[in-house]
Image (cartoon, helix red, strand yellow):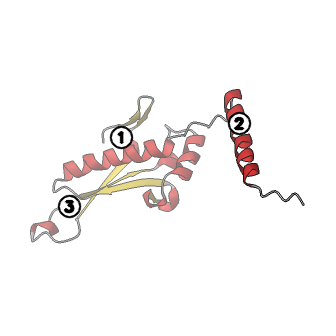
Amino acid sequence: MEPLEIRPNLVIPGEELHADRVCSGGPGGQHVNTTASKVRLFWGYQASKVLSEGQKAWLKDHVPPRFFADGGATIHVACDEERSQHLNLEACRERLVATIRAGLHRPKARIKTKPGKAAKARRQDNKSAHGRKKAGRQVRNDD
């Protein structure tokens, strides 16, 4: 099988990928029982040589459980939307790339910021204006 490029610096060798062809389910007439057009694509990421241990752990934590097989050691995707086995294989390859990219994505760390001087001054002005408004509503009893 051909290598699968996830990113420019991350390419899964074709030897690590395994594709299964099975009969697709559902209605379809007589021909559906004789063609294996559904494709399942497997990648044993735990045994992969292209990922570091940290990346493997990150993938295990950030890929949805429905994509795991073999007790979590293998990521798999399936496709049976097309009538052609070749098109289903290409769709599986694209789904696997998208799944791995999403699983390896690390969001940017949020940088905590503090309000500036002008924002603090506006806040204080609003507070004092609100206080004056409330003070103007008070009923005064000068007995």
Direction from residue 81 to residue 96 in the image, left or right: right
Q: Say which element carries label 2.
A: helix
Marks 1 and 3, Cα distance to the nearest angstrom? 22 Å
The residue tagged 3 is 36
Q: Amino acid at mark 3?
A: Ala
| Image coords of residue 99 (percent x, y) | 41, 48
The residue tagged 1 is 14
| Image coords of residue 134 (percent x, y) | 73, 51
Q: Amino acid at mark 1?
A: Gly
Direction from residue 71 to residue 3 in the image, left or right: left
**What residue is at 76 percent from the left and 50 percent from the top?**
135
Q: Are discs 1 and 3 less than 8 Å apart at CB?
A: no
Query: Which numbered circle lies on residue 125?
Result: 2
Marks 3 and 2, Cα distance to the nearest angstrom? 73 Å
Above or below, comparing residue 89 to residue 32 in the picture: above
Q: In the rendered view of the protein, which quadrant contains the C terminus?
A: bottom right
Which class describes the residues within 10 Å of circle 2: few (<14), some (14-19), or many (20+)?
A: few
| Image coords of residue 85 (percent x, y) | 20, 53
**What residue is at 56 percent from the left and 52 percent from the top?**
61
